[in-house]
Image (cartoon, grey):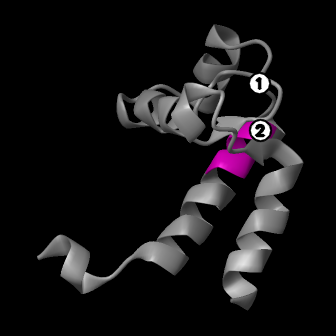
Amino acid sequence: MKQILALIIAMSERIEINPDIYNGRPVVKGTRITVQTVFDFLAAGDSIEQILQEYPKLTKEDVQACFNFASRLMDNQFSTEAVA
């Protein structure tokens, strides 16, 4: 329970989940840019600087918050049963 609370607190500063924005998918607070979008760009080989050029509303701290969110989510949600 403490880990979930820590995730929510960390998330609330820069990442938000609002059912009215992208059906509740995590977005960078104050934008409609999803955490997944940031990771899709990174997975395609774009640098953080390229993402910031594409989305000028984002800051390096926002991108870092996406990393932190995903890391904490994986820490709390991953199980070998989900992979099998």
Q: Which residue is mark 1?
A: 58
> Which residue occupies the extreme front position in the image?
20
**Residue 70: percent from left, percent from top:** 56, 58
For the C terminus, give its image quadrant. Answer: bottom left
> Is 60 drawn above or below residue 56 in the view shown?
below
Tag of residue 62: 2
Q: Residue at x 84, y 66 (%)?
A: 9
Q: Residue at x 58, y 39 (%)?
A: 24
Q: Give the image quarter of residue 68.
A: bottom right
Disc 1 on helix, strand or loop?
Answer: loop
Q: Give the image quarter of residue 22.
A: top right
Q: How far apart are the two marked residues, 1 and 2, measured between alpha carbons?
A: 6 Å
Looking at the image, which is closer to me, 81 or 62? 81
**Residue 38: percent from left, percent from top:** 55, 32
> Is 77 drawn above or below residue 14 in the view shown?
below
* The residue stretch that appears in magenta: 62-66
**Residue 19: percent from left, percent from top:** 63, 37
Q: Amino acid at mark 1?
A: Leu
Q: Is residue 71 toward the left or the right of residue 81 in the image? A: right
Q: Badge 2: few (under 14), some or many (20 or more) residues near its Cα, within 10 Å? A: many
Q: Give the image quarter of residue 60.
A: top right
Q: Is residue 38 toward the left or the right of residue 11 in the image? A: left
**Residue 43: percent from left, percent from top:** 38, 37
Badges 1 and 2: C-beta atoms under 8 Å apart? yes
> Which residue occupies the extreme left position in the image?
84
Question: Is residue 46 highlighted in magenta?
Answer: no
Main secondary structure type of the part rendered in magenta:
helix
For the N terminus, give its image quadrant. Answer: bottom right
> Which residue occupies the extreme right position in the image?
13
Q: Amino acid at mark 2?
A: Asp
